[in-house]
Image: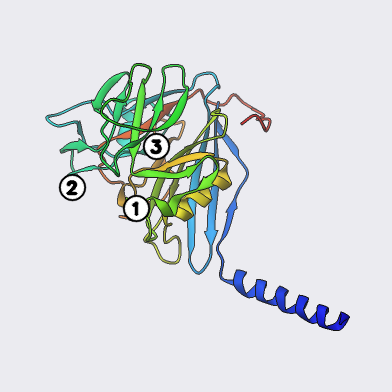
Amino acid sequence: MKQRRIWLFAIAIASSLCLNAGAATVKTSGWTPVFIGIDQATGSIDGNDASVAYALRVDLRAPGISFYTTPHQGTLNTVASTTSQFLTKYGLQVAINANFFAPCCAATTENKTVLGLAISDGNVVTAPDSTPGQNVALVISRLNKATIEETTESTDLSDVFNAVAGSGIIVQDGVNVGSQTPYGDGADPNPRTAVGLSEHGRYLYLIVIDGRQPGYSIGTTHAETADLMLAFGAYNAINLDGGGSTDMVEDNGHGGVKIINRPSGGAERFDANQLGIHAFPLPPFFHHPDSDNK
């Protein structure tokens, strides 16, 4: 009887190893400060194909942190620019692409229609609506209180100073719900951009995941994007525009711009709107203590 139990236990272990042999492994690096209140990290999903992610963690209580999104311009909602151009024009320290838009995807400064809620410094660029695939948004108050909300035409905007919208919620109350989000081609691996918040709202997470580049990074599904968001520390998160739009840039401290990721088209796309952050530079010999107050 004892030998039979040992034999069954060995079979169970072997079966478990076989089931997990092809499973993806999520890895993240430690956080490195790049500006006061902004830390940077990398991540990956290693399975049959690799996917590479870049993340920023923003302390919403840090001195000097403020936000800016693409303002209303042109004959539609905005005029397209690259994320690097956006960062340089408005003197920002970091920026990512944000809402889905139309038309796509001329490499020129054409007029764009922004899909979903967009607010820039208290000015509404596009009003909220309840259209599925456009009705979830990151909203930020003047005092940097951030929440993730589903929007409708009657959403109260009185306390919203900046906002960007995406295609769906992928992490909800600490649970991966990415597979339940049907919009944004979530079942196939693609380059992704996403934003999320920690459980108590202190930290905002911005991530980009490169894709469509076999041998380097193929991209992620919504569920895999959610796995990365959870690993970085997000408790709620939404998917933003991805594909060739996926882009994260940073002020290099010398009047130029550093593109953090590798856009899948080989160059930055001219996007309709972006989310950017002002921050103070790090002082010499800055030491960043880890904080567990999330």
Helix, strand or loop at label 3? It is strand
Q: Are marks 3 and 2 in contact (CB under 8 Å)?
A: no
From the viewer's perspective, is residue 231 above or below residue 68?
below
Q: Quadrant of residue 271?
A: top left
Q: Give the image's coloring scheme.
A: rainbow
Label at residue 257: 3
From the viewer's perspective, is residue 275 above or below residue 24?
above
Helix, strand or loop at label 2? It is loop
Counting from the top left corner in percent of width and height, residue 174 is at: 55, 42
The amino acid type found where label 2 is placed reads Ala
Residue matched to label 2: 106
Query: Quarter of the image containing the N terminus?
Result: bottom right
From the viewer's perspective, is residue 212 above or below residue 139?
below
Using a 10 Å C-alpha cutoff, classify the residue at mark 2 as few (fewer than 14 neighbours), some (14 to 19) or many (20 or more): few
Going from N to C along the chain, the mark reached first, 3 or 1, is 1
Identity of the residue furthest to the left in this view: 75
The residue lying toward the viewer, choosing from 284 and 87, is 87
Label at residue 182: 1
The amino acid type found where label 1 is placed reads Pro
Residue pictured at 59% horizontal, 54% vertical: 27
Q: Are marks 3 and 1 in contact (CB under 8 Å)?
A: no
